[in-house]
Image (tube, helix red, strand yellow):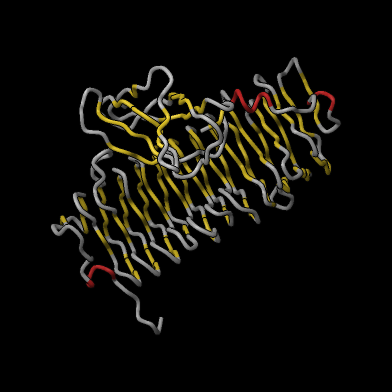
Amino acid sequence: MRDNGADTVRITVVPIEALPMEVHALVLSDGTRAEPVGNAIVPIRKAGRMGEAMELRFAVKGSMERGGLKFECSVLGASVRRTVDVFPYALRDGEELARVPAADPRALPFLHFDDEARIITIKPGVWGITQNVELPAGFTVRAAAPLNLRIAKDVRLLSRSPFDWKGLNEAPISILNDGELVLLECRKESLLERVQVEGAGRVIVQESAVRMKRCVFQSSGEGDQITLVRSTANLKDVEIAGGTDALSLIASDVSAEQCEVRGPKDDGVVVRGGKLVWMNGGIAGGKGAGLKLGVQSDAALEGAVIRSEGNGVQVRDGASLKLDRCTIEAKDLGVAVEDLARISGPSRVAINATSIIGGGGELSSGKGNTVLLDGKVLESASSEAPKKKSKKKEKSE
């Protein structure tokens, strides 16, 4: 979502429905209705595929708050209208990013351009970035240890070319990020191996592919620490700690193996649309959920340990979840499935051979959803898993 001046707001939407939808208005937090500018028909999402993002524009007079926005919408041609929440994703679009004043990258002493080989090299050493830098498309951005890169507060290092960053076991590439580290619309997959990122800033991947191996991300700031938007990622032996939400996935396809998420203030992993496959490792939430699914996302976890001060797992808005041989420990509900939302359809949950310990109950299936526990359908609208399914450990252990 972005404010395009005093009279127009542009919102990126991703189709999730099997029927075309019409957006009739953007409802602001104070109840004011903003009419769409031009076409506001959202096409169907093709079966088995992620919906293609599109942009809607709305005429808004004066200033507006980003929080509390809703769409007033309906199935195309239908008379019944619904309202659905609008959530802002963590990155403005590429056009806006291109307008941010940035230094000439060819004039920076820590960068070497090889135009013939199409390689940009970040030179070894200790370097500080105190002004915005945008690396152009059409290159590969290489970095190797020993390298210590410091991104100052409110400064963005943005690349439209993929990274090829490789640290060493005894000397990982070190990034002190108090600003933003961004991959945007990269045509080839990026590789980050043995990279350590600390600081109060954020890492953002939009419309790009990335592979991370043996990386550590440690945030001391607010906001989502790592955000992926319409991207693909393969994570192996990656640690992500801190942030408000540690890992936020929006309309992305992500696989994670032996990864650890811990220490966020709110949620551990948030998935809105797209797909998540998580093998082993652990996810820890803060005051929110360990794992939060929405907007018809699809998640499958095997052998994972999920802990949280709130709900262990939270499912809503037509999301699908499969848990196999996992362990869930939560102060509130172990698994909370919210009531059916008519605009998004029922959620679907299948839990197999999973230990669930919840201070507020083990499992709430909500209304109108499909929930299977060890192959058996839970028939009640809202129920708890039988105690014998939780396989609780004795206190002495």
**Residue 180 as seen in the image, left or right of residue 248:** right
**Left or right of 142 in this view: 38:** left
Residue under the point 28% across and 37% down? 82
Along the viewing direction, whichever of 284 and 113 lies nearer the viewer: 284
Residue at the far top in the pictured view: 116
Q: Quadrant of residue 154?
A: top right
Quadrant containing the C terminus is bottom left
Q: Residue at x 81, y 35 (%)?
A: 123
Q: Residue at x 57, y 32 (%)?
A: 92
Q: Which residue, as the protein is rendered here, is positioned at the far bottom?
A: 396
**Is 88 rendered above or below residue 357?**
above
172 vs 212, left or right, is right
Q: Splitting the image into 4 quarters, where does residue 143 fall?
A: top right
From the top left corner, tell me how far across and down residue 148 is, in percent: 78, 45
The relative height of residue 148 versus residue 357 in the rendered view (above or below) is above
Q: Is residue 40 left or right of residue 378?
A: right
| Residue 350 percent coordinates (x, y) | 25, 52
Q: State the residue in front, 182 or 356.
A: 182
x then y, percent, for residue 86: 42, 39
**Residue drawn at (15%, 59%), measured in percent from left and top?**
380
Does residue 119 lie above or below 344 as drawn? above
Taking 277 as reference, is 159 above or below it?
above
The image quadrant of residue 387 is bottom left
Position in image of residue 326 (x %, y %)? 36, 60
Q: How many marks?
A: 0
